[in-house]
Image (tube, rainbow, N blue to C red):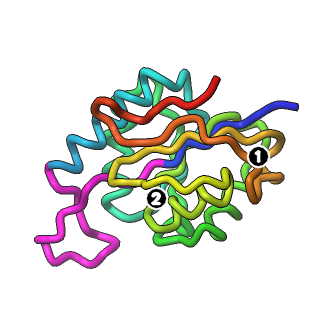
Amino acid sequence: MSSRTLILLRHGKSDWSTGDPDVRRPLADRGRRQAADSGRWLAAHVDHVDVALVSPAERTSTTWDLVSAELPTPPPVRMEERAYAATAGTLLDLVRNLPDDLGKVVLVGHNPGLEDLVETLTGRWVLMKTSGLAVVELRGSWSSAGRASAELRASGRPPPPGPKLLGG
């Protein structure tokens, strides 16, 4: 049975000083640096990504732009309205509806939905700081994703020590 890889990426640190509505809040300078660090980590540890699902919030799309600029071959991007401020249930529904010809998918979104999704899929809670990554391996099809159906392979935030690679 084949496996699939889901890479969850929380947006970079946002700038609250602008007074912009939540969906239009930009990244802070620190968030821009963190996002590029996450991109370099992905480039070093993930051989390719088939597609990126990105929340339409400015901070998530800018995070992905900075991350993907570090990848040798940036994947196609799909803006996913339902990922904005989504619950784990909504995010799980997005995952379950992915086509099985996709092997590696990045989902760029927000907390607490991302932390809750990692826990739902792996049975392990991990802290998803800004620009944090969680790499989970699902056994079987995307549609079979559910409670404790995946294994956590890495989690954390670059730079060093960056996401800790777990297991084999």
The answer to whether residue 97 of the structure is visible from this angle is no
Please say if 125 is above or below 67: below
Q: Quadrant of residue 21?
A: bottom left
Label 1 neighbourhood size at 10 Å, few (<14), some (14-19), many (20+)? few
Give the residue displayed 41% in from the left and 27% down from the top.
Answer: 71
Give the residue furthest to the left.
Answer: 17
Badge 2 element: strand
Q: Quadrant of residue 137?
A: top right
In the picture of the structure, the residue carrying the numbered disc 1 is 99
The CA distance from mark 1 to mark 2 is: 20 Å
Q: Are marks 1 and 2 in contact (CB under 8 Å)?
A: no
Give the residue displayed 32% in from the left and 61% down from the top.
Answer: 58
Q: Is residue 17 magenta?
A: yes
Image position, residue 72 (x, y; %) = 42, 21
Q: In what quadrant of the picture does the C terminus appear?
A: top right
Q: Name which of mark 1 and mark 2 comes first in the sequence.
A: 1
Image position, residue 97 (x, y; %) = 75, 56
Report the amino acid beneath label 1: Pro
Q: In what quadrant of the picture does the N terminus appear?
A: top right
Image position, residue 32 (x, y; %) = 22, 46
Q: Is residue 55 magenta?
A: no
Give the residue displayed 35% in from the left and 54% down from the top.
Answer: 129
Please say if 167 is above or below 33: above
Report the amino acid beneath label 2: Gly
Magenta-colored span: 9-29
Give the residue displayed 43% in from the left and 55% down from the top.
Answer: 127
Looking at the image, which is closer to me, 101 or 2? 2
Label 2 neighbourhood size at 10 Å, few (<14), some (14-19), many (20+)? many
Please say if 71 is above or below 151: above
**Residue 109: assigned label:** 2
Looking at the image, which is closer to me, 131 or 128? 128
| Circle count | 2
